[in-house]
Amino acid sequence: MSEATVLAIRDLVVEHRREKSRETFRAVGGVSLEMAAGDTVGVVGESGSGKTTLAMAATGLGPRTSGKIDLLGHDLDRLSRRELRRLRPEVQVVFQDPHGSLDPRQSVRSGFSELRRLQPERTAWVDDTELLAQVRLGPEVLSRYPHQLSGGQAQRVCIARALLMRPRLIVADEPTSGLDVSVQADVLDLLNESLASSGASLLFISHDLAVVRNVCDRVVVMLHGEVVEAGPTYQVLDDPQHDYTRKLLAAMPGSRWRASR
């Protein structure tokens, strides 16, 4: 594995026990994935395909049954809880629900201050006003609480919080799915700009292939917990080889693809 490798997953399996039953079901089955520094990789599939489970397990935020994961050069199986906590600032997650990600009792300024207190050296590179400017928000937002922010503003604050930590890997889990189309475009542009300036890698979870096309260099298509197709984004989306990929493309407005041909 290269020193530039940010994430390497080998044969990841995640199984869950069904409620009121001793049976288990496989949410992720034998998935492998590798990301280098600066990579932007999209993981796509319908709800229940295992894409979010994959991302959470890969970053140590979710359970896994078997498989090997190297995160930022560290074997997760060899890390203690204390060592994993030290690694956390290098990996930041932007979730689907921005308001649910923010403490309703904290103003934006207070949220930034808490991160600065926990990681003073890592966060000293920028002040609050400049950080907000990077996500196209004015300084007046600092005094606001989450309920005073629109969905787009709240998501920009979440992206700002992630950028403040200067991570090497950002995991974005459906970060635009709850936003209006015009706001989605702004947030995606912001993500692209942020990645270009920071050099961070991006693992982007989405059900929307149009969004993935605009953000990611590579794409992984998942179905029932398994990878059915993967490759450069232009290749997979312009010449899909699997019928499930064509089905996803066919659901896009104006698509020329059909579920089978």
Image: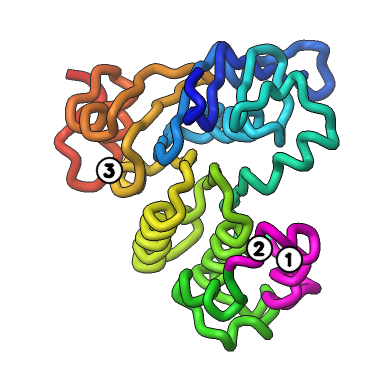
Give above or below for 201 relative to 81. below
Residue 256 screen position, x and y as percent:
14, 36
Which dot, 3 or 1, sits closer to the camera?
1
Find the distance from the CA under tag 3 to the CA under tag 1: 42 Å
Based on the displayed image, in which of its 4 quarters is residue 19 positioned?
top right
In this view of the protein, which residue sits in the foreground, 190 or 154?
Answer: 190
Q: Residue at x 23, y 24 (%)?
A: 240
Q: Which badge, 3 or 1, is on the more N-terminal residue?
A: 1
Which amino acid, by three-letter code, is at mark 1? Arg
**Magenta stretch containing residue 118, yes or no?**
yes
In the structure shown, which secondary structural element does the residue marked by tag 2 occupy?
A: helix
Find the distance from the CA under tag 1 to the CA under tag 2: 6 Å
In this view of the protein, which residue sits in the foreground, 156 or 162?
Answer: 162
Please, which residue is most extreme toward the bottom here? 140
In the rendered image, which residue does mark 3 sit on? 252
Q: Are marks 1 and 2 in contact (CB under 8 Å)?
A: yes
In the rendered image, which residue does mark 2 sit on? 123
In the rendered image, which residue does mark 1 sit on? 116
Residue 238 screen position, x and y as percent:
18, 31
Q: Are marks 3 and 2 in contact (CB under 8 Å)?
A: no
Q: Is residue 162 left or right of residue 203?
A: right
Magenta span: predominant SS is helix
In the structure shown, which secondary structural element does the residue marked by tag 1 occupy?
A: helix
In this view of the protein, which residue sits in the foreground, 250 or 234?
Answer: 234
